[in-house]
């Protein structure tokens, strides 16, 4: 019995010594040699991480750099990199493969704020990277394992819906994110069938999405992010009632992001159904070098959205307006409102403005 007790005391003593050693090694400053070993291991690990991160970048299929002249709208940045936002690697791969090198000013302002969950009201000129400014945070926040609609992007036209969904698909091509487009004028039955499959991100026009939500096939209760592109149009009398009803279907703690080139004080001034745009030679190419206004717009917002198709992402573009005698008042008014001068066509136009 006495021996047993002695043996037990020895065991306790050994345990105590081991604990002391452990404390000295791990907690007390100066510690043991092992802390040096730890440091070495850490540096080796971080070097391994660095080299692996270099590997994935080296494997990307990046388009050739764009060497055209760019204006300050896209070059006056703070010098951030896309990696500064701690985005998923698969998303970064899509961003670089799309040819984006660094965030533009509107992206630098929007992406970090959108990722924190705050609402955003942003105004930026046409062609400065607005679409990616909301697509990148939307794709980052989507949980691809949760098969519910998590983001809705509202746009005023079918063309813009197709264009925006294309950008989302290209940026998110390495992510398993399901994007769906729905707009009026297409088969409702096809859309209903599509909604039985997983959809994470829905792009469309307010009327059609509201229709599907009211029918109970488009479930938006888990949708925590609503994005409005060309928000000034979506707040016009034509769309506003649908947009307001649609917001009621979303989750209570939703985040709303609004982007536009113009936020007029009154939205009632522009109506696109009164023949303000009789002739529009249409193209689905997003970036054009030259815009010709065959029929001069009646107000500055329409003018701005139209000429904004050229000179995308800080490149130079040319807008030619064909002016009749009746258009002279509109021309003068638009010049005043936009604080710009629409010059007469000079005898010689520098080709660098509109040629690649």
Image (cartoon, rainbow, N blue to C red):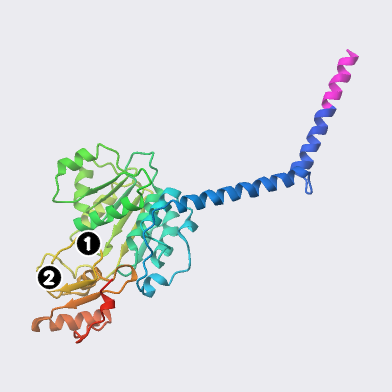
Name the main secondary structure of what is drawn in magenta.
helix
Q: Quadrant of the N terminus?
A: top right
Q: Is residue 174 magenta?
A: no
| Separation of residues labelled 1 and 2 (CA atoms) | 22 Å
Work out whether residue 2 or residue 294 is closer to the camera in this orientation and state it. 294
Q: Is residue 7 magenta?
A: yes
Residue 35 location in percent, x, y? 73, 45
The magenta region covers: 1-12
Image mark for residue 276: 2
For the point 14% across and 66% down, the residue is 272
* Vertical comparison of 345 with 83: above or below: below
Quadrant of the rendered image containing residue 302: bottom left
Residue 177 location in percent, x, y? 34, 44
Residue 181 location in percent, x, y? 24, 49
Q: Can residue 216 be spotted in the picture?
A: no
Residue to which mark 1 is pinned: 285
Image mark for residue 63: none
For the point 16% across and 80% down, the residue is 330
Work out whether residue 161 or residue 248 is closer to the camera in this orientation and state it. 161
| Label 2 packing within 10 angstroms: few (<14), some (14-19), many (20+) | some
Give the number of marks. 2
What SS does tag 1 mark?
Answer: loop
What SS does tag 2 mark?
Answer: loop
């Amino acid at each position: 019995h006495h021996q047993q007790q002695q043996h037990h005391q020895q065991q306790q003593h050994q345990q105590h010594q081991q604990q002391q050693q452990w404390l000295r090694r791990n907690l007390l400053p100066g510690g043991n040699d092992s802390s040096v070993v730890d440091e070495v291991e850490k540096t080796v690990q971080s070097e391994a991480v660095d080299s692996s991160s270099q590997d994935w970048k080296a494997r990307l299929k990046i388009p050739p750099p764009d060497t055209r002249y760019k204006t300050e709208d896209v070059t006056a940045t703070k010098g951030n990199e896309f990696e500064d936002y701690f985005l998923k690697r698969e998303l970064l791969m899509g961003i670089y493969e799309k040819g984006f090198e660094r965030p533009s000013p509107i992206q630098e302002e929007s992406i970090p704020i959108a990722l924190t969950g705050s609402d955003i009201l942003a105004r930026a000129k046409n062609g400065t990277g607005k679409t990616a400014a909301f697509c990148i945070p939307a794709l980052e926040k989507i949980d691809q394992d949760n098969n519910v609609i998590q983001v809705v992007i509202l746009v005023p036209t079918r063309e813009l819906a197709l264009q925006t969904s294309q950008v989302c698909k290209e940026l998110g091509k390495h992510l398993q994110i399901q994007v769906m487009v729905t707009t009026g004028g297409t088969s409702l039955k096809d859309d209903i069938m599509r909604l039985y499959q997983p959809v994470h991100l829905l792009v469309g026009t307010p009327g059609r999405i509201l229709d599907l939500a009211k029918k109970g096939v488009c479930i938006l209760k888990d949708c925590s992010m609503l994005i409005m592109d060309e928000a000034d149009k979506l707040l016009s009398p034509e769309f506003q009632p649908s947009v307001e009803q649609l917001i009621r279907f979303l989750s209570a703690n939703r985040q709303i992001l609004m982007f536009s080139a113009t936020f007029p004080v009154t939205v009632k001034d522009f109506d696109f159904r009164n023949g303000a745009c009789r002739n529009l030679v249409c193209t689905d190419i997003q970036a054009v070098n030259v815009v010709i206004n065959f029929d001069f717009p009646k107000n500055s917002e329409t003018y701005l959205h139209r000429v904004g198709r050229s000179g995308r992402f800080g490149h130079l573009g040319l807008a030619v307006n064909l002016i009749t005698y009746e258009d002279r008042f509109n021309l003068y008014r638009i010049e005043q409102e936009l604080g710009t001068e629409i010059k007469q066509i000079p005898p010689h136009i520098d080709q660098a403005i509109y040629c690649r």
